[in-house]
Image (tube, helix red, strand yellow):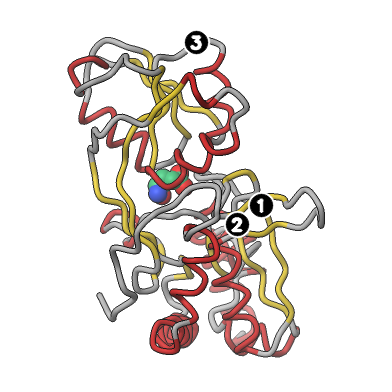
Amino acid sequence: MKRFAAVLMGLALVGTFGTAALAAAPADTLAEAKKKGVLVAGVKDSLPPFGYVDEKSREIVGYDIDFVKAIARKLNVKLELKPVTSASRMPQLTEGNIDIIAATMTKNPERAKQIGFSHTYFATGQKFITNKGKVKSLKDLEGKKIGTAKGSTSEQNVKTAIPTATVLAFDDYPQAFLALQQGKVAAVTTDEAILAGILAKAPNKAKFEIPPVQISNEPYGLGMRKDDAKFIAFVDKTILEMEKSGEAKKIFEKWFGKGTDFQLKRTFKITADK
Ligand code: GLU
């Protein structure tokens, strides 16, 4: 009888959370990763310098990757990288296909209802790439077609900032930039650091610019399952240590410092900010 009740309860749980979540997502990633000897990170694979495929090594490299590398090293486990998109990263995490999101992800209260976030490990703000000389203020984008990525804060923010614009949401930003090059949209919008990365790699970059028009602040967090308290604490501790030891700054300089494709100032420090 007891067993029957347990089965019934199990079925009720499956009904509530879905089979994939129940079967795959560990509640204690820290213990599970140590047991398996591997940590699985969801990352971008076409957004330099955050996560992109290095032409020589054919491996995914970047600012986001270096953070999860450091976390896996501290855990003493191997790191497996799985490409995600802005729209797929949260379901991939909650379904247990990845253990941590390191994918240009803004932390905000709406998302924090569904997943847990680390302290802020990067900070940027949303801007636009446009044809040179075309956009001086938001007014110049009214009624225009604007490309961005599905499931991003960029998509939500631009709809609020320019209600008259037609927003075309692509799988990721390189596709949106292609639409700009083909004249199908008047602008691409997302975080400035991503736009600068796209522009730096563009063959015809002299035709485009990022006007000084910012519509939001975007603090990035590493995403983890909401109930995964020990792992979240471990990741927070690790990135605070990385700040203290200078490793976090070194990673920033490696991807955004002098001699890189584009330069950014480090306007933030990793601090306990929750
Ligand atoms: N940081 C923003 C977001 O999390 C835009 C970049 C992205 O789509 O990953 O939605």
Q: Residue furthest front?
A: 259
- Give the distance between the C-alpha atoms of the residues marked 1 and 2, in whole angstroms: 5 Å
The answer to whether 238 appears left or right of 274 in the picture is right
- Give the distance between the C-alpha atoms of the residues marked 1 and 3, in whole angstroms: 27 Å
Query: Looking at the picture, does residue 122 appear above or below residue 180?
Result: below
| SS class, disc 1 | strand
Q: Which residue is mark 1?
A: 83
- Give the distance between the C-alpha atoms of the residues marked 2 and 3, in whole angstroms: 28 Å
Q: Position of residue 72 (x, y in %)?
A: 63, 81
Q: Position of residue 74 (x, y in %)?
A: 60, 89
Q: Disc 1, ligand 1: is the CB inside 8 Å? A: no
Residues under numbered marks 1 and 2 in contact, where contact means CB atoms less than 8 Å apart: yes
| SS class, disc 2 | strand
Indicate which disc, 2 or 3, sits on the residue closer to the N terminus.
2
On the image, which quarter does residue 213 sit in? Answer: top left
Query: Looking at the picture, does residue 271 appear above or below residue 111?
Result: below
Q: Nearer the viewer, residue 9 or 98?
A: 98
What's under tag 1, amino acid-wise?
Answer: Pro
The answer to whether 187 appears left or right of 76 in the picture is left
Q: Position of residue 41 (x, y in %)?
A: 62, 66
Q: Residue at x 47, y 86 (%)?
A: 238
Residues under numbered marks 2 and 3 in contact, where contact means CB atoms less than 8 Å apart: no
Q: Which residue is mark 3?
A: 184
Can residue 8 be seen from the camera position used here? no
Q: Disc 2, ligand 1: is the CB inside 8 Å? A: no
Q: Which residue is mark 2?
A: 43
Q: Residues within 10 Å of mark 2 (few under 14, many from 20)?
A: many
What's under tag 2, amino acid-wise?
Answer: Val
